[in-house]
Image (cartoon, grey):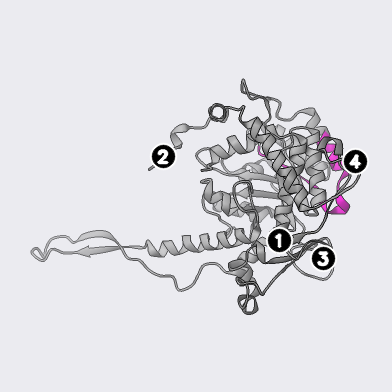
Amino acid sequence: MITRLTRTTTGSLSGATFAPRDVFWGQLGGCLEAVDGGTTTVLDHSNINNSPAHTNAAIDATKSSGIRCLYAFTPIKRLKSWSPFEWDEDLLPAWEMRQLQELAQRQPFAGGRIKLAFGFDWYFLPRQTVVDLFEKVRGLGVKLITSHYSDTPVFGNGSIPALLADYGLLKNDMVFSHACQADDVDASLLREHGAFISSTPDTELQLSLGLPICFDPSFYPNSSLGSDCHSINSSDIISAMRLSLQTSRGAHNQRYLSHMELVASHKKSDAKALPNIQWKPAPQNPKRTCATAEEAFNLGTIMGAKAVGLEHDIGSLEVGKKADIVIFDATTPSMVCAAENDPVAAIVQHASVRDIEIVIIDGEIRKENHKFAPITIEDTNFAELGTGTGTAVIEWGDVVRELGESRERLRKRWEMIDFAQVTRELIKAFSIDETKIVDAL
């Protein structure tokens, strides 16, 4: 069972065991999984920047996948050693800032399909350090910054939008993942500054982050849908549309079903006595659902494009926009008749990955007849990746083989790590209050 704490220990921290070759094939496989599910654009909050070679491997793999991407280069907390467990205390090493500057000068990549973004979560750093870093990043021409906003008992950090507004840094180039505990003040700040949130219902529900807020009327205009941690859940946006829609409806309906009323009762034997007043269940049914399939569809398409500042290029089918197109087979058992009646509702409430017949990104067919097009790998350090020299054209089966070999290498490395000790060190490093982690209420 994956929780927020175990996901950080065996998920995020285990990235320290990845060699650049593992990063390349893992990133390629992840991007292709997204393409397979009909996702044509991703904002990649990349936490695998262990070294310049790791970052280059991730970008090269993203190029090869054919997906459109805003690659958010992210400073990470690195390990010096697993045993003894030791952190690298330099959170912003000089090499990292040099690589960020080099990438900013070289972008965009893949003919404009991949652009540089920036990921940041170290808001415990001094105010001036954060201000100077944001100003440097924006000065380099980086057009998008993303952060996690997850104010939970384990990893609580307060309101990130409020902190950034206080620092004078909150702008319309920011996307916040989750924000499940956001309040009316946050909603007002997002609207005022044009910033967005990205709800990722799979992980939010599983990792005790809270209920997705993307359908909340206060947040909906500045919301979008995403997929987080596809190593533990589905990565396709269709699933995110359906799960967020039905979760929102369920939470809305439960308020009616849990309705209570004050009821006064008298004892027949004593008419002069004060009435006995009690709250008693009085369940109701709502007249209508609180959210629509069209709203869910928009969250996963045009509003996602707005969130990353690309609504003039992608997110809908219009003359002059990029040719990012997903074609569904309307004759499958799950889609037949439903697609003829209401195509949008059919996609949101009936479709699955198997119904996606063709995926076109930037005018190129990346999936057809339910199969990937040949994958071209170029401009890559092939000696490091073990794939030979020069440009290579591979099939999905080649990726499968490489992923299997990478998994086996990583498994052997993980067998040498005492993850229980790592968890204890993590709790200490982040000052986690263990009394807030309980088995039952």
**Callout 2 amino acid:** Asp
Labelled disc at residue 389: 4
Please give the label number shown on residue 321: 3
**Residue at mark 4 to residue at mark 2: CA–CA distance:** 53 Å
Residue bounds of the magenta highlight: 99-121
Earlier sequence position, callout 3 versus callout 1: 1
Classify mark 2: residues with Cα within 10 Å, few (<14), some (14-19) or many (20+).
few
Q: Are marks 2 and 3 in contact (CB under 8 Å)?
A: no
The picture places residue 245, in percent across and down from the top left corner, at: 56, 63
Q: Nearer the viewer, residue 36 or 276?
A: 36
**Residue drawn at the location 79% of the way across and 70% of the way down:** 318
Task: Write the residue at 42% across / 61% down.
Answer: 255
Q: CA distance from mark 2 to mark 3?
A: 51 Å
- Indicate the amino acid at tag 3: Lys
Locate the C terminus by quadrant. top left
What residue did someone put label 1 on? 38
Q: Nearer the viewer, mark 2 or mark 3?
A: 2
